[in-house]
Image: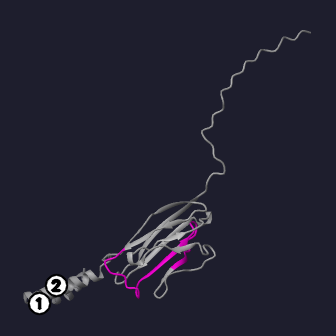
Amino acid sequence: MMTWLASVWTVRPWLTAVLRLTPALRLTAELRLTVALLFFLPGCSCMDVLVTNNINALNGSTIKISCTFTSCYKMDAAQFSMNWTYQESSNHTEERFMTYHVKKKMVPVRSDRFGDRVMFAGNLDKNDLSITLSDVQLEDVGIYNCYVKNPPDRIQGHGIIQLNVVTEPLCKTTAFQPPPHCSLTRPPPPCIT
């Protein structure tokens, strides 16, 4: 109770002073407070990352993993950043395999896992950060993360894609039904001894 009273007495002189201001000065003070609150409130951002959450790929095929973003701000190459990472389904460690570099644009980070199989397939002018993965392997199953930061947006956008790899069956069958079969057997002849 004493803490509440102490806080009221500390705020009250400021509040009384604001209320005594002329209407024009009071509006200015309220406007500054509103702008300050909007600036510091979480979620005041325009960043949105769009991905396909689950992708099924055929073993040995080439696929496009799409990642696009929307932002209220035009991309400034000097401040923009993005990364693609891979994460095994059973592991929480992320391995970066693609990044944005101001002078070189999109740069694949060579990894033992992907080698030269990952290429940038997007268009930065259209906010498209998609990649292609060629010769998809069973070991490529996992989570692919697309991270985007486009200041002055304050949050980092994040898209999560689960890649599943399927194989073609080794043999193909059509609906199998045994041919109709009918046989008649006679009981064996009686044994006479």
Q: Position of residue 120 (x, y in %)?
A: 50, 75
Q: Which residue is mark 2?
A: 30
Q: Quadrant of residue 69?
A: bottom left
For this orientation, the residue located farthest to the top is: 192
Nearer the observer, 103 or 89: 103
Q: Which residue is mark 1?
A: 25
Q: Earlier in the sequence, mark 2 or mark 1?
A: 1
Q: Quadrant of residue 2?
A: bottom left
Total numbered circles = 2
Nearer the observer, 79 or 105: 105
What residue lies at 84% left-to-right and 11% top-to-bottom?
Answer: 190
Task: Give the secondary structure at mark 2.
Answer: helix
User: What is the magenta range?
Assistant: 70-98
Q: For the C terminus, which image quadrant?
A: top right
User: Callout 2 environment at 10 Å: few (<14), some (14 to 19), or many (20+)?
Assistant: few
Q: Position of residue 21 (x, y in %)?
A: 9, 90
Task: Give the secondary structure at mark 1.
Answer: helix
What amino acid is labelled 1 in the image?
Leu
